[in-house]
Amino acid sequence: MPVIPSGYCQANLRFGGAAAPLGSEITMGFEVVDFGTESPEDVANTIADAYTPNVMTRLASTLILQEVYVKFGPNDVGPSGSAFRTTTGADAGQAVPPNTAAIIRKATTLGGRRGNGRLYQPGLLEAQIDAGGNIAAGYVVDLQTEFDDFLTAVGAGGLNPVVLHGPGISSTPAPSPVTAFIVQGVCGTQRDRMRR
């Protein structure tokens, strides 16, 4: 489990709808610039308000953003809160199966596996994925633009994305600032998690 220091939070974006019938979730970490005055609900609303007009515009209309849940650090005693939504994707195209997602790399200035993160974005359009799992170049550009705009919007709202770290062989490092969300050109699948 990631360590959430004081001054930071973990946000879980929770999805449903026909494109995610059993639910789907994205996890991100953030430094909260106004940690002493912002509530978890305030932060959840900021994230939802930044995500909805940007990333959701390129996703299938059968995907629904239902909740942004935010947990403040420290892990044991930090408060939590949610922002609830019923926001659908803006594209009427057919969604890919729910075990397929875009891989978005959370780039930092650090090297190695521990210095970077990733998230899996559900709700891609089936017409934009070929038989080998390659995402159409134009769709990658569109998604990249939306994630760039999301990064700008949360920053303007006083939230700086970070990669939160868990304990390992060495001591737990401080959260690593995310410099970019980078959309990968090949989608990911989770075959073992596809329920019948």
Image: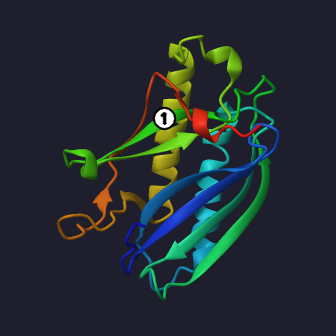
- Up/down of 16 relative to 163, above or below: above
State the image quarter where residue 133 is shown. top right
Residue drawn at 67 percent across, 71 percent down:
82
* Quadrant assignment for the C terminus: top right
Residue pushed farthest bottom? 77
Residue 90, given in percent of the width and then of the height, sits at 76, 34
Query: From the viewer's perspective, is 28 left or right of 193?
Result: left
Indicate the colouring scheme. rainbow
* Quadrant assignment for the N terminus: bottom left
Residue 48, given in percent of the width and then of the height, sits at 64, 57
Residue 7, given in percent of the width and then of the height, sits at 39, 78
Kindly identify the amino acid type of the residue bearing the numbered disc 1.
Ile
Count of labels in the image = 1
The front one of 7 and 185 is: 185
Query: From the viewer's perspective, is 177 left or right of 25?
Result: left
The front one of 174 and 92 is: 174
Tag 1, which secondary structure?
Answer: strand
Query: From the viewer's perspective, is 8 left or right of 109?
Result: right
Residue 56, given in percent of the width and then of the height, sits at 67, 40
Which residue is the site of mark 1? 103
The front one of 196 and 187 is: 196
Residue 33 in sight: yes
- Up/down of 31 relative to 47, above or below: below
Query: From the viewer's perspective, is 89 left or right of 55?
Result: right
State the image quarter where residue 17 is shown. top right
The front one of 110 and 165 is: 165
Residue 145 in sight: no
State the image quarter where residue 53 is shown. top right
Residue drawn at 28 percent across, 58 percent down:
176
Graded by Cα atoms within 10 Å as few (under 14), some (14 to 19) or many (20 or more), the crowding at tag 1 reads: many
